[in-house]
Amino acid sequence: MQPRKLGNSDLMISPVGYGAWAIGGEGWAFSWGPQDDSDSISAIHRSLELGVNWIDTAAVYGLGHSEEVVAKALAEWNGARPYVFTKCSRVWNERSEVSTILRADSIHRECEASLRRLRVDVIDLYQIHWPSPQNITADNEEGWTAINALKKAGKIRFGGLSNWSVEQMKTAQAIAPVTSLQPPYSLIRRGVEEEILPFCKENNIGVIVYSPMASGMLTGAMTRERIAAFPETDFRKRSKNFQEPLLSNHLAAAARVKKVADRTGRTPGEVAIAWTLTNPAVTGAIVGARNAKQAEGVMRAAEVKLSSSDIAELTGAD
């Protein structure tokens, strides 16, 4: 994979990175259901073998478990060390209830805990997972100031944001440059195209998009029957994107993806991911895989070349 420079950093990242959300397993509100750690480690290793050079996780994924699995996978990996990205601001209590906290002391504690779980001396990219839920500017400023203090202290190499609006990014930029933004982006979730992606491109903010396959909706494997059979611990069971009135439109989009995939000899997941990479503001896409077989089917998405007619068909513009 031809690497791309991430924003104002010196990080040269593969267009596809490994996303470690699902490998956090059960026991928290946004679980993907049961997950075997050995499968997770195999998925990470196969992704790295296929040219991926960065892993994106978060403290809250599995309430620390995802970071621990990433650490184990890297300890057993014999190749070049990938970049490790993680996130803060989503914290949990003894009842596993998650809330968003941007206080400086909390972010510093989170960073130390992530360093321990990941078993690294420095985090390559440390991102604020969510801004203030009340959109309190002072809270966002305190959180971003804390990130830059961690950078000066040598705990992290670069700081980024996730799920922040243009106005919130402007607030952060007034304090210190933002290296990257992590927004949701897929064929069925395109709201960032209007303002957020152009702002990032104009301001040299790298963009690593999450859920390019729409949490599995665009993989070609999703059916109404499979959705109905999701375990109760799978957050998608409660997601509006997997329920009517949105479900029918999303399955129609998935059918368009599969049609293009069949014609081009690629998997639907690869096509869905490749579509996000055609946007010039996008640096890379975060791609999850729960086992080595899934990794085989999606991690080479950057090799897919979509024609203008393919893109028109995917977006329903033909």
Image: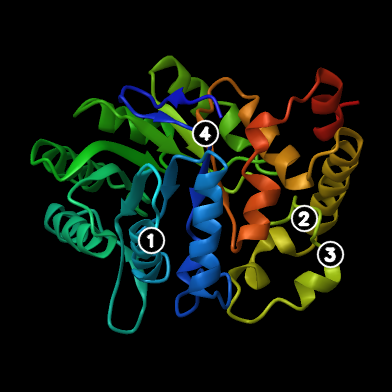
Measuring from the top left, give residue 106's x and y in whole percent: 17, 60
Q: Is residue 56 above or below residue 51?
A: below
- Give amino acid for label 4: Gly
Amino acid carrying mark 1 in the image:
Glu
- In the picture as drawn, the residue positioned furthest to the top comes out as 202
Q: Is residue 215 visible?
A: no
Answer left or right for 203 relative to 228. Answer: left
- What's the residue at 11%, 57% (across, down)? 105
Residue 183 vs 305, above or below: the answer is below
Q: Nearer the viewer, mark 3 or mark 4?
A: 4
Q: Considering depth in this image, is 169 or 182 the residue closer to the camera?
A: 182
Camera-side residue of 52 and 62: 52
Residue carrying label 4: 284
> Left or right: 89 with respect to 279?
left
Q: Front-most of 17 and 311?
A: 17
10 Å neighbourhood of mark 1: few (<14), some, or many (≥20)? few
Marks 3 and 4, how far apart at CA: 28 Å
Could you tell whether 228 is left or right of 273 in the image?
A: right
Mark 4 or 1, closer to the camera: 1
| Residue with the mark numbered 3 | 223
Q: Which mark is residue 76?
A: 1
Task: Please tell me whether mark 2 sits on a helix, a strand or a loop.
Answer: helix
Looking at marks 4 and 1 on the same chain, the residue that comes earlier in the sequence is marked by: 1
Spatial CA span between label 4 and label 1: 25 Å
Mark 2 sits on what residue?
246
Q: Earlier in the sequence, mark 3 or mark 1?
A: 1
The answer to whether 60 is drawn above or below residue 80 in the figure is below
Q: Nearer the viewer, residue 318 or 261?
A: 261
Mark toward the start of the polypeptide (2 vs 3)? 3
Asked which quadrant contains residue 228, the reply is bottom right
